[in-house]
Amino acid sequence: MDSKPSPVPPRPGSGALKARTAEILRVDHAGELAAVQIYRGQRAVFAAARGKDAAAAEFAELGRQEEAHLEAFESLLSRRGVRPSLLSPLWSAAGFALGAATALIGEKAAHACTEAVESVIEQHYAGQVEELSAVEPALAQRLEAYRADELAHHDKAVQSGARAAPGHGLLTAVIRAGCRAAIKAAERV
């Protein structure tokens, strides 16, 4: 995996922590929304393909785990009065399209998608945990638990043949770059 990003420097002034926490919750909600849709897209393709019931079930299970994360973030957004990303419809559509497209390439490409996404998200959560551990320890602990789930997804994808996907290097580089760009956009918009 890539090196861990350095945490965002603290903002000065009153309300800075609240504003930064809102960014964190907004982007994490957007990420989990996209993850749910990626797995729905993959599951849809494999469920419709003959002989791919096991793959459909595997991606459905991963999707259920992401749905639990998404529900938790929806609750946090509501309790803290934070609006979700205005680009949520884009994250949903792009996630589903990415999931379906990689599944159409094949199981290994679908796993490569998971590997790429989870490598970025794991690093993203690690940076947030480091940033929040002293000021929002309960939230940091929750994010660390989600980070562990994402690492497990990553590792399972690698064990399932992700690195044998056609064009693995290019495929994962493009997906990782897209994830990083989406993170920047979702924090703000």
Image (tube, rainbow, N blue to C red):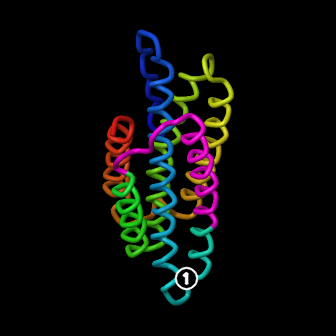
Q: Which residues are magenta?
A: 61-87
Q: Quadrant of the C terminus?
A: top left
Q: Position of residue 163 (x, y in %)?
A: 46, 58
Q: Position of residue 82 (x, y in %)?
A: 49, 37
Amino acid on which disc 1 is placed: Lys
Query: Residue at horizontal 36%, vertical 66%?
Result: 97
Residue 152 included in the magenta stretch of the image: no
Residue 64 included in the magenta stretch of the image: yes
Q: Which residue is mark 1?
A: 52
Q: Is residue 183 above or below residue 138?
A: below
Q: Is residue 126 above or below residue 113?
A: above
Q: Position of residue 151 (x, y in %)?
A: 59, 46
Considering depth in this image, is 17 or 176 the residue closer to the camera? 17
Query: Residue at horizontal 57%, vertical 75%?
Result: 55
* Left or right of residue 27, residue 135 in this image: right
Q: Is residue 156 above or below residue 131?
A: below
Q: Is residue 5 above or below residue 159?
A: above
Q: What secondary structure do most residues of the magenta stretch adopt?
A: helix
Considering depth in this image, is 145 or 79 the residue closer to the camera? 79
Query: Residue at horizontal 46%, vertical 66%?
Result: 110
For label 1, the SS is loop
Residue farthest toward the bottom in the current orientation of the protein: 50
